Amino acid sequence: MRNRRQFITAATTVSLLSIAGCAQNEGAGRQAPDPVDLSGQKTDFQGGMVIGDHGGPNGQIFYEETEPKPRQGAGVEGNSPDNLAWFHTLVYGLFPYHFEMRNSGAQAAAIYVTDYSTVDWELSSDTMIMPAPTSPETFADATELTYVVGSDARGGMGSTLLPFSNSDDAARFISEYNGRTINYDEIDRTIISGIRR
């Protein structure tokens, strides 16, 4: 296994959370809510799988004045913020779900995904599956990240998008594990369908 990044310092964590709190708002300009902790056996809104158990990036979306509905019997246990949906995968969960919600008129107040520039991760050569951190400080504003697509690394359900806040980290990742970079605005149904193939 190769250790790729050291844990970020407490000061950096605070800075990143401050930036995340000001995430781009698709809605009316209100302050975006902060990301939440996705540990504790929370189940995915797109399929009901437990978040953090399967590897790969996780995500969460806060919607403006729209309550997301769990899919396929997925439950949300305990207290959770209003208008929040969470996902154990970006390619099979977060983005397809968000495309549908957006088509029905919903607007996102904040979209957060795992930021691999801010976590300590190891990629085992036998599985090539990225970890699935769930703590709030491991999430960043999805609209501000660089995504690696088409790499040799995998999420819990296969090929995936890998988000990085530091574009140099993304470039180093590609030099070792292949792929190419895209930004948030390039992620659409065609990109997601291509990854799922």
Image: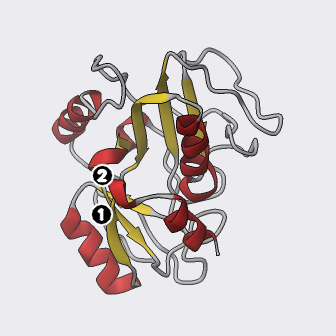
Picture disc at residue 67: none
Query: Where is mark 2, residue-wise?
Result: 118
Position of the C terminus by quadrant: bottom right
What's the residue type where badge 2 is placed?
Thr
Mark 1 surroundings: few (<14), some (14-19) or many (≥20) residues within 10 A:
some
Horizontal relation, residue 121 to residue 171: left or right: right
Find residue 5 and name its label: 1
* Left or right side of 58 for 139: left
**Measured from the top left, where is residue 80 in percent x and y?**
58, 18
What x and y, as percent, mark residue 145?
Answer: 29, 53
Q: Identify the image quadrant of residue 29.
A: top left
Label 2 crowding class (10 Å Cα cut-off): few <14, some 14-19, many 20+? many
Residue 195 image offset from top left, x and y in percent: 56, 71
Q: Are marks 2 and 1 in contact (CB under 8 Å)?
A: yes
For the point 30% across and 85% down, the residue is 175
In the displayed structure, would residue 72 be above or below residue 52?
A: above
Q: Secondary structure at mark 2?
A: loop
